[in-house]
Image: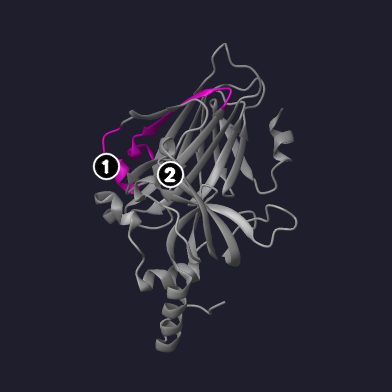
Amino acid sequence: MDFFYLGKLMNLVTVFTAVFQGFAHEICESCDCLLSDLPNSEHGVRSVKTICDEGKIEWYSPYGALSIELKYSRSGSYRACFMVESVNTELQVSEESWNNSEFPLSRRLPPAASLKPLVSINGNHKEFCVASLTPVILYLEPVRTQEMSGLSHVKFQYLLESRNFKAELDPIEECRPCSKAELIMAYCSSDFVIEGRMANVTHKEEESKSYVGVHVSRVIRQRDSTLFYRPHRDSKELYGHMVIPRHCGAKKSKGTFLFAGKVRFGEPTKSCSLYLDDWERIAANAVKDGDMLCTLK
């Protein structure tokens, strides 16, 4: 399977490649990027720079190594989070010394080519995050054993976000109820806002996540129409699930809620929730006082 054939499978991928001295220097011109090692190509280090705060890189027939530079669009301290799936190959992910990047202060530091091992992957791996003030450079090195056969493939998903220092100091910060101001902001700006009832709660210790099934009676907003779906043709309600940190100890509760959150690595992740009756009172008062940030739907 060559690069040009794979390129036809992706409508949102544009990759400019320049090759010299065995290295491929590439810029992903969209948030989703597709790479494939060419037959008979030299197995050196491919260097990729991303332009988005969220996206994915799919690497087919990986050989040699891949250096990925992640640069946050905002200033200040941030987290570079990623999830990796490897098929028919093992993968070692390391962090390169940040002064190998184009960050201006790097010129004042002594040269360094150190690699800090982060995680070894064989199959799927849960989310891993690195905190930084500067561009994060990750080094991916595939290792294919004799027992592995078939097409090898690496899927690298990344998300860059501002750090929540309160949550880092106290994990329970992620579990506290949202304030009125946070509820209004979540209603007006979240990736999804729905009304519905909790169907079930499933805890997955190995992922440090809880999955909350929801019967959705009303969709106010959803970034992706596949998040909440009709399980059967004659179903009157939609269905879907939300992710909550496992340490929050989510439990099934009765009643109709307003749920709001963002999509994180393809999964709807809850940020705020409240009984619908309580939200309607808060929203009515916000409209009356001129504090509502958007039009109620």
C-alpha span from label 1 to label 2:
42 Å
Q: Nearer the viewer, mark 1 or mark 2?
A: 2
Could you say where residue 33 lies in the image, as x and y percent from the top left?
A: 59, 42
Q: In terms of secondary structure, where does tag 1 sit? A: helix
Horizontal relation, residue 75 to residue 279: left or right: left
Residue 108's disc number: 1
Which amino acid, by three-letter code, is at mark 2? Lys
Pointer 2 local density, CA inside 10 Å: few below 14, some 14–19, many at least 20: some
Q: Quadrant of residue 13?
A: top right
Q: Which residues are drawn in magenta?
A: 87-111
Could you say where residue 21 lies in the image, as x and y percent from the top left?
A: 53, 26
Q: In terms of secondary structure, where does tag 2 sit? A: strand
At 68% across and 56% down in the image, what residue appears? 230
Could you say where residue 96 lies in the image, as x and y percent from the top left?
A: 37, 33
Q: Quadrant of residue 8?
A: top right
Residue 209's disc number: 2
- Determine the residue located farthest toward the left in the rendered image: 169
